[in-house]
Image (tube, rainbow, N blue to C red):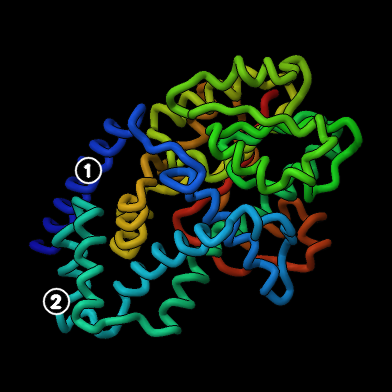
Amino acid sequence: HAASWRLSRTVKVLTVHRRSLASRASGTRPWGHDIGVGSTALWSAHARAEEAKELPPLFSDPFARRLAGEAGSQVEAAVVRSTALLYSDDLAKPLGSRSDLVSKHRGDPRRIAAELTKLEAHGVIPTERQVASAVRSSRGGFRFRTLYFDAAMLQAASQSTLQFVTLGSGCDTRCLRLEMPAGTAHYLVDQPSMIEHFELALEAELKDRPLIRRVGVRFGEEDWKDKLHAAGFDPLKPAFFLAEGLFMCLTQAEVDDVIKDVASLAAPGSRFAADYLTTALLEDHGSAPALAKMAELQFPVLSSFEGRTSYAKVAGGHGLTVVDDQLSGDPSYSVFMAFCVRCLGHVFSARIPGHRVTLSEKY
């Protein structure tokens, strides 16, 4: 009964803390291509660049290394190291049991991160195996969502969709690496500093590509719809909207606004793909170190959904119908977008708890 009470109390404290973070986030988040939410794009690009080392690689992104730079690998190293430290065999010696540490600071992710940094002062370092395991787990979500959204976009293109809007585009290079029909227009929507970074890194590739249109906007602070219209978007034609890695960086209210705005712009036949974290993941003690480090690096996770039912309720409330929603790595992926999986010759056999990908349609 005592353990049950402590767990209940921990969850309540974490929930209050997350709400506090959310209330402070809007209008105060740091902007820049290599700080705050911008650094998550570099982290994602680094993970895609590292895919080239896999045998066989699931996809190829020849532009990712340039976009990620050294900063992308540094963000990954910081996050995965905190997770590896938590599972170090020597943790109990200086700081008590793992469960004691997590329970003690569950309501304040920043304090967890600060406490974990004390481990090295005590001579505790994660083994290579523990770091490798944490890296593999970290990259799993990036790998699956990349493959999933690649397939979703290719399917939309095969069905005559010629407008693709990427919200929070970051270092997304699908506009360059996926083969699309002639006349396809890509709209990359992100904060101005990230757009500038993208343009500088890929200046040669973007030259003479007028249908790759960049739209600078700060989500949560500015209205992106008018800027999208000004860039040439046609709301009377079907479009494919993508929000990859965006939702978790926005408050729940901001996520709702994005879904509502997409639905208002989407002509019948349009699709909206996104990914999100589950509430269960954020309340799991094993996630605490990574979430703590992310908060320390100024990109705290600010929103989540219980799962498909709760997401579908929000999407449905704005006129979108969820046609697919699954855990990353769900083996049923071999059924969804089977043509793409067959081409890649790979089917995921393990799930990645707490990270879900979803696809909706506007009828």
Residue drawn at x 61%, y 37% as measured from the top left: 196
Q: Residue at x 65, y 56 (%)?
A: 66
Residue picked out by circle 1: 17
Q: Quadrant of the rendered structure where residue 158 is?
A: top right
Measuring 80% from the left and 43% from the top, which residue is drawn there? Answer: 155
Dot 2 or dot 1, earlier in sequence: 1
| Mark 2 → mark 1, Cα distance in angstroms | 24 Å
- Provide the secondary structure element on which disc 1 rests: helix
Residue nearer the viewer, 293 or 7: 293
User: Does residue 47 show up?
Assistant: yes
Residue type, numbered disc 2 = Gly
- 247 versus 258 height, above or below: below
The amino acid at mark 1 is His
- Residue 32 position, x and y percent, is 47, 40
- Quadrant that contains the C terminus: top right
Q: Nearer the viewer, residue 139 or 298?
A: 298
Q: Is residue 329 visible?
A: no
> Residue 197 lies in what quarter of the image?
top right
Task: Measuring from the top left, give residue 143's x and y in whole percent.
Answer: 61, 60
Give residue 232's position: percent from left, percent from top. 74, 19
The front one of 143 and 330 is 143
Q: Is residue 53 left or right of residue 255?
A: right
Mark 2 highlights which residue?
Answer: 96
Crowding at dot 2, Cα within 10 Å, few <14 / some 14-19 / many 20+, comes out as: few
